[in-house]
Image (cartoon, grey):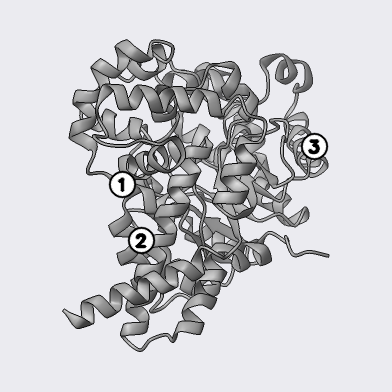
Amino acid sequence: MESREAAMTLAQELHEEIQQIKIIDTHEHLVNRQMLSDMGFNIIHAMEIEYVKDSLLAVGIDPNLLVQGGFQTDNLLDQVIPVLWKVRNTSYYRSLFRAFRDLHGLQGEELDRRNLKRVSDSIESAYARRDWYEQVLQKKCNIRYILRDMEYMPIEHDFIRPVIRMDNFLMLRHRRLLQDWIERGAPIFTLRVSEYDYTNTVKTFTDYLDLLESHFQEAQTFGAIAVKVGIAYNRTLYFEQVSQDEAFRIFALPDEKTTESDIKAFQDFMMFRIIEKAAEYRLPVQIHTGLLSAGKNRLGNTNPLLLTDVFLQFPEVRFDLFHGGFPFTGETGALALMFPNVYLDTCWLPIISEMTFKRALKEWLCSVPASKILWGGDCACAEGTYGAVATMQEALAAVLAEKIEEDVLDFESAVWTAKGILHDNAEELFGLKAP
């Protein structure tokens, strides 16, 4: 009992220290506050754009319910509350509802309709405030920088640093086929070049490669500090070397004569070209690995081990592997240990499963240099990020307290490790040190 109480006290002391650490958040999808305010952002929207929706989908809720009912808060709460009871054990739920308590005064029974309606009204009022993001993200969360994966969305705040996706160049040429084969009639969200621009710009394979070059130039002008590839939502992460002649042949094929193997080969070529360009522009490459929000692909296709040939081919490029590769956390740790250019990013993982994060981090700290581990929230609104920060800080303190109890670390080195994971490692990787 005394040992347990001592460990709890140690974790509390570490937690207090960790809360003082400035954070560089490596990955968010933060939507501009004004955009959310204009749509009347409320509790239903918050659950829809954060991961409570994924928990609800896992128990069979209609995927369109939250989207269609965002402006019918009262009626929709009556439908959603019985289902929320089924998922309130999850880290997704607990993280977001913690934000509702701390930021919007949720008290008493969490799933009382009147209590949730008060939270919803508070959320809507908060997003009318120009300083809401500064108050939550900078002052409460102690965030120095957020790396935002939202393409060229106007930057409202000086603490946001853009990350630009390059997935579209794996899919643009065969977008019409992929519309049917991969997304089954739903929009391919990674195609961020308009049909007009594409058809008026790209006539030849050289034009296609030139468009990629211009996209990198635009990203550089916009201030991008990394590029992102999230193609695991659409295909396997296994990329093979393909010659430019073969890519040219496939580009020239009419759609009706193009096979799935042709498309994979073309995408493989473009992936290697994207990484070559990232090397040329000295940009780290962030890659989605592991769990897929709301499904859409075979989970085995997202195993980070599939990227091994890419790491071998490009030792000069630094790769930031997302989500700890969950559920392939052991594999991700092994890659970070094997390759000097591979970093282990725990973004999203603590709110997927706080327990999995703690177990994985404890194992990683036995083998992976602490200077290669990073963290980000992977959320879309201030409440999501607040909950992710709070969850991470508590989980990190608990793991490091265990390391001290086991005589692996002392208090000073534990705080140093926490500062690296939350700030210093990202500062070094993304070149964010003050001049």
Label 1, residues with CA under 10 Å away: few <14, some 14-19, many ≥20: many
Q: Which mark is residue 329?
A: 2
Query: Would you say 310 lies left or right of 277 here?
Result: left
Residue 262 in the image: above or below residue 196:
below
Which residue, given by chain and number where applicable, does mark 3 sit on? 218
Instruction: Classify residue 37 by image quadrant.
Output: top right
* CA gap, disc 1 and disc 2: 18 Å
Query: Would you say 91 lies left or right of 418 here?
Result: left
Q: Residue at x 74, y 44 (%)?
A: 158
**Which element type, helix, strand or loop, lies under badge 2?**
helix
Labels 3 and 1: the sequence-earlier one: 1
Amino acid type indicated by mark 1:
Ser
* CA gap, disc 3 and disc 1: 38 Å
Label 3, residues with CA under 10 Å away: few <14, some 14-19, many ≥20: some
Q: Residue at x 67, y 46 (%)?
A: 273
Q: Residue at x 76, y 32 (%)?
A: 211
Where residue 300 sits: x, y (%)? 33, 47
Which residue, given by chain and number where applicable, does mark 1 sit on? 91
